[in-house]
Image (cartoon, rainbow, N blue to C red):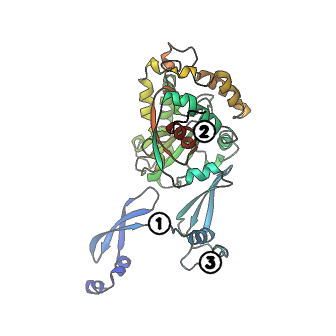
Amino acid sequence: MTEQDHSSSPPEDLVKYFCADSVLNQDQAGRRVTLLGNLRSKPAILTLERTVFPSSLASLSWLTKNLSDVKNLGQNDIYAWFLGCSPSPGAPFNEISSPAPAEPAGPALTPADIKLNLIYPCTDTHVRKYSAQGMRVVTETPEVYWTKVRPFVERKRGGGRLDWVWNILEGRAEQKDVLLRVHHPEEGFLMAPDLNWDRKTISSLHLLVIVERRDIWSLRDLRKKHVPWLERMRKRILEAAVELYPDLDGEDQLKLYVHYHPTYYHFHIHIVNVALEAGPGQAMSKAFGLENIISQLKHLSPSSSPSSSFSLSRSTITRSQAQDKTESSVPSVAKDEEQNHAQGDDPQGNDDDNDDEAGLANVDMTYVVGEASELWTEVFEPLKRGNKKD
């Protein structure tokens, strides 16, 4: 067709005459891709972006019932995740009460374009977490941590909430997904793909390292004495990731961070490609860079040790209380370790002169919480409203 013929075509026909030569850019989840090519023998750039999902419940129900080529990526406890293909254009639309059967699988080359994460059965906590909600900036002082947040964290570790973590660490689930495992009482860890990664796009690479030791629940439990361990972990993690994924151009394409508050209270580290677009998990005041954590620990003064500074040493939980609560919330194989952990974190300890005991439990931390989260409703909202009841 001549250039004159092109000019007489409807504008929407221009796209079909675009010839792609290369990919200029693609976002972290493949929702947007920018192509360089030619049109009418002239260079052209075309950006394709997936439209948003429909807001109608009937349309969304039809969508889930007509997905094709659904492939299970893994399952652990109540969590499962899948890849699937959008319904073909000719798939019939039915109301919720009368769903259409799934369409036959498409051609072998049809790419999976939808990732699904399933929580079944879900709890009220899950519903609150995934619901649209307002956000608040809070400052967690050492006194608030020891008197309010620490007991909250202990409750969140109970009731089988960490069963899925123990399943992975003890070899009962997701073993085919484990990329690297190192067994050691203190240095042990495993590395696996994060469930939000499609496991193929290097620019959106997202891995997870879960440590075997059970005495560190969150970054609040880190002390200056843990710096050598953290530095060794950082080195091993970066070396392993680059070796596992040779398409990476060195360790400087990776960043490591820790969440506070985390989704679950067992210490773990996120590894992501620096090109990964920051989502809620990497948001300011949510993700704390591992290198920054190490640096802060190195420069903590003895006044940040558990028994220093605050009157909180008189108001926090006692050793026996921490021990009793811990025994009822963790598997028996970890009880001894957890009891030592509770004792070591007791602000009434005798480590006043030990600089190595200076830790992040005794510094202010500012971060963002959702108004529907239990951390807000049980801890910070009552404090904001002046309710001093436990």
Q: Pointer 3: what residue?
A: 94
Residue at 40 percent of width and 63 percent of height:
33
Question: Which residue is outermost to the front?
Answer: 386
Q: Earlier in the sequence, mark 1 or mark 3?
A: 1
Give the CA separation, mark 1 to mark 2. Answer: 39 Å
Helix, strand or loop at label 3? It is loop
| Side of 319 where 39 appears, left or right | left
Q: Quadrant of the N terminus?
A: bottom left
Q: Which residue is mark 2?
A: 181
Q: Nearer the viewer, mark 1 or mark 2?
A: 1
The answer to whether any part of residue 182 appears in the image is no
Q: Please, what secondary structure does the residue beneath circle 1 have?
A: loop
Q: Is residue 10 visible?
A: yes
Earlier sequence position, callout 2 versus callout 3: 3
298 vs 97, nearest the viewer: 97
Nearer the camera: disc 2 or disc 3? 3
Q: Return the residue at label 1.
A: 52
